[in-house]
Amino acid sequence: MNEILRAGKDPGTADRYLWCTPDTVSWGSLPVAATPPVLVVDSGRTVTFDTVSQEGLMEDQGRDPVAYFGRFGTAERDVLPDAVELAASDLHPVSTAKGPHIVLGPVHVRGAEPGDWLRVDFLDLTPRVPYGIISTRHGRGALPDLLPRRDDGGPMPVFSKFCTLDESGGRAVFEHNGGRSSIGVRPFMGLCGVTPAGDEELSTIPPGPFGGNLDIREIVSGTSLFLPVQVEGAGFYLGDPHFAQGNGEIALTALEGSLRVTARLSVVKSRPGRRAEWPFVDTGEHWIVVGLHESLDVAMTECAGRAVEFLVHHTGMTPEEAYLYLSAAGDFSVTQVVDLVKGVHCAVRKSDLAA
């Protein structure tokens, strides 16, 4: 890609368009039921969202994206103006911030009621800039006491890698001590969810039954995320755009970069007696269910239990049959271990269930 995708410029053919301004985002916390919507749409409508990554805007990076990305040779014209505006705003003060993520929304979807599903069909996810950042911070990640460290062995507060996309946009260049490696680009939103019930503003870091910071790398273009509606209108939001991520996300972040996202938002009524409770994903090829807990062991147990329940209700298997089937055909993976609440997800091939 040669030009950045500027907010408001050629946003495509979606029914509505929404971009990041100090009036349309929160920084570090999720919306609550009383948060006024920044957009109202009918069920089944499409929306294009211009999202902004928090990387390059954080306080420990100088809160000046022009200067920060300029260190890596990025010209000022290639820094998103909406990123510059957010960094210069009074959002996300250090003393009150709960999390790092810039959250765009909420979007009120007419007809959505607690107990329904909000189906989010991701139609397109496109990098807005030809570069991204991978970061780790001392005391975080899967190796909090070991990395990152300075040459003298002391703790290093922040260590980051700036990666550029190749001309096709399909791979990112990772320059390192031994030369160059590449990372396949598979854009997805690390954080997308519905507004949690209650009056407390929750941190953006831990995911929950409302979705949020799920970090499921399989939710790429062409897939659908089903979120259990918690409040009237759903209050959909998204943030934490990723160019690529490995399962586990062990260092703290993925390859982070701003994305233009087009999605269809649809209300799906639950079956009688089957109130929507936990997110799941339809990739076209697989069903994916998730388990979440501070303990990775418990997250695995919860994921297994939800996978059993999912098969019981979608195939008619008994719980014992589903348990055996998943042992032979379910693919369990560690989603992430860095969001306070850890994640495990299970993928089940849909075509096998129809055999």
Image: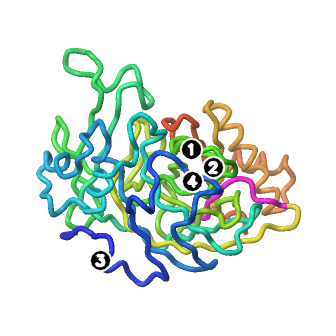
Q: Is residue 90 above or below residue 177?
A: below
Asked if the magenta segment contains residue 165, the reply would be no
At mark 2, the secondary structure is strand
**Label 4 sits on residue:** 31
Instruction: Indicate the amino acid at tag 4.
Output: Pro
Specify which label sits upstream in the sequence, 3 or 1.
3
Disc 3 on helix, strand or loop? loop
Q: Nearer the viewer, mark 2 or mark 3?
A: 3
Is residue 309 placed above or below 127 in the rendered structure?
above
Q: Is residue 168 left or right of residue 236?
A: left
How packed mark 1 is, by other alpha carbons closer than 10 Å (few <14, some 14-19, many 20 or more), is some
Verify CB contact (< 8 Å) between mark 1 and mark 2: yes
Residue at 34% of width from left, 59% of height from top? 258
Which corner quadrant of the image does residue 271 belong to?
A: bottom right
The C terminus lies in quadrant: bottom right
Residue 333 got which mark? Answer: 1
Spot occupied by residue 178 in the image (x, y as percentages of width and height): 17, 36
Circle nearer the N terminus (3, 4): 3
* Kind of residue at badge 3: Lys
Q: Marks 4/1: CA distance?
A: 29 Å
Q: Which disc, if any, is residue 346?
A: 2
Is residue 277 a member of the stretch shown in magenta? yes
Q: Which residue is mark 3?
A: 9
Find the magenta span and give its range. 274-284
Q: How is the image coloured?
A: rainbow
Name the quarter where the N terminus is drawn.
bottom left
Secondary structure type for disc 4:
loop
The mark nearer the N terminus, 2 or 3, is: 3
Residue 222, x across and y down, in percent: 51, 71
Instruction: Please state the horizontal and vertical placement of residue 171, each as a whole percent of the image.
Output: 28, 58
Q: CA distance from mark 2 to mark 3?
A: 39 Å
